[in-house]
Image (spheres, rainbow, N blue to C red):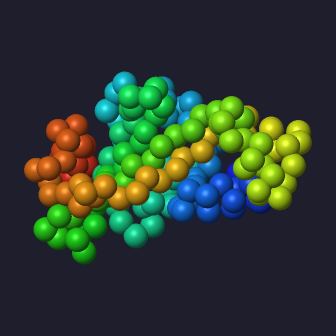
Amino acid sequence: MKAKDICPRFHFYYGNMHGCNVLWMPRSDWKKMQMSFSDHVQLEIDNLPISKVAQNATVVAIEAYLSIGGNYQVDIYRLDPNDYPKEYNKDTYYVNENMLHIPNYNEIVQKASTEDNDNLREFLSNNVCMIKKAKPENHHLTFDALPISVQRMVEINQKSV
């Protein structure tokens, strides 16, 4: 069963609340991704919910890091030739690893017309939530404006093609 098929009211309301599509990822997949954060490796995302971002463009790199508040953020860099000369797009996702402890949890449950039951708690315990941030001014980038680590990944990928 796909994560979004479980607790659909909560899923739908939470996305509407943030005004964007919210991606849900099984916690086990998130943990696997976390294990590779210290290395620069190409992540295989085809079977993950985050693969939706690659439908109309080529993902060239994914970087995750701890933000100032101690939460993870994920930057996804895509190549979209239609945006030339700034053909690289950067999307940032805030990762919420502990939905059960967000300050307005009970209010969200109520407004989503669902209930705080074992099914919802199991779903939230077994998944992490990725919320797309609004597009920043640096959403469209040239190759030279990409972080050095992303430039390296692009170069490595070009050599392997």
Residue at the spot 17% in from the left edge and 64% down from the top edge? 86
| Picture quarter with the C terminus | bottom left
Q: Position of residue 66 (x, y in %)?
A: 41, 29
Question: Is 76 placed left or right of 121 in the picture?
Answer: left
Which quarter of the picture shows residue 80? bottom left
Residue at the spot 17% in from the left edge and 70% down from the top edge? 84
Q: Above or below — where is 138 with respect to 80? A: above
Residue at the spot 48% in from the left edge and 43% down from the top edge? 94
Residue at the spot 47% in from the left edge and 53% down from the top edge? 132
Which quarter of the picture shows residue 123? top right
Q: Is residue 94 visible?
A: yes
| Residue at the farthest left position | 144
Q: Above or below — where is 73 with respect to 11? A: above
Q: Is residue 2 visible?
A: no
Question: Is 38 placed left or right of 109 in the picture?
Answer: left
Q: Position of residue 87 (x, y in %)?
A: 21, 64
Question: Is 73 placed left or right of 155 in the picture?
Answer: right
| Residue at the farthest bottom position | 82
Q: Position of residue 76 (x, y in %)?
A: 37, 50
The one nearer the camera, 42 or 79, is 79
Q: Position of residue 74 (x, y in %)?
A: 42, 42
Q: How many marks?
A: 0
